[in-house]
Amino acid sequence: MTDGLSFRPARAAEIGRVREIEQISATRFVGTSRAAIADDEPTDVDTLARRIAEGGLLVAAADEIPVAFVMFRELEGCAYVEQIDVLPSHARRAIGAALLDTVTAVARSRGWAALTLSTFKDVPFNAPYYRRLGFVEVEALTPGMAAIRVEHEARGLDESSRVFMRREI
């Protein structure tokens, strides 16, 4: 289902496109208990540029045009997935799963133990989706996860509705 797509590091010239993918993808929250996310600003340019420089922003591209991306960074010896988005026009083709598999390969090459992430418990395309991909809920937060929780709360996210998850490499 991912035929015809290339999975590669994002380029600095694609930052605008990545922000566009994030904004368009946020519309999938309309009609859920998290509809306000559709009005959020996409990730800032500086953060995206930093992730590109660190090798932590990958895209899935069709004819060299990104249609999905995953952004991650090292956290406590793991690849912490900060954001993953697929354009609705390319949804339900296993592109998100393929991006996570690509992150797994990168993480393995860097000697990291697992992929971790934070997501909504009650949104069908969040925690239930990641469970199907082999992620399990983290019972006790690590110090790094606790710090991310504080960051999320500072941005106004309701952390009582979120869960941290982990998938071993």
Image (cartoon, rainbow, N blue to C red):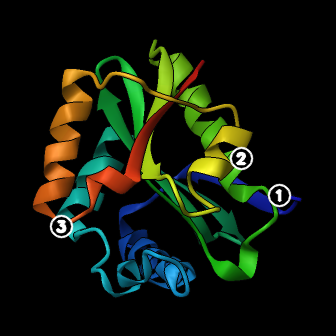
Expressed as whole percent of the image width and height from the top left, the position of residue 101 reads 67, 37
Q: CA distance from mark 3 to mark 2?
A: 30 Å
Tell me what residue is drawn at x 57 percent, y 80 percent. Answer: 28
Disc 1 target residue: 2
Point out the image quarter for the C terminus: top right
Which quadrant of the figure contains the N terminus?
bottom right
Residue 20 visible somewhere in the drawing: yes
Give the distance between the C-alpha atoms of the residues marked 2 and 1, in whole angstroms: 8 Å
Depth check, front residue: 154 or 84: 154
Mark 2 lies on residue: 98
Q: Taking 87 as reference, is 11 above or below it? A: above
The first of marks 3 and 2 along the sequence is 2
Q: Which residue is mark 3?
A: 156
Which amino acid type is shown beneath numbered disc 3? Gly
Image quadrant where residue 112 sits: top left
Residue type at mark 2 is: Ala
Circle 2 sits in a helix, a strand or a loop, which is it? helix
Element carrying mark 3: loop
Horizontal placement of 23 versus 2: left or right? Answer: left
Amino acid residing under circle 1: Thr
Of pointers 2 and 1, the one earlier in the residue sequence: 1
The image quarter containing residue 148 is top left
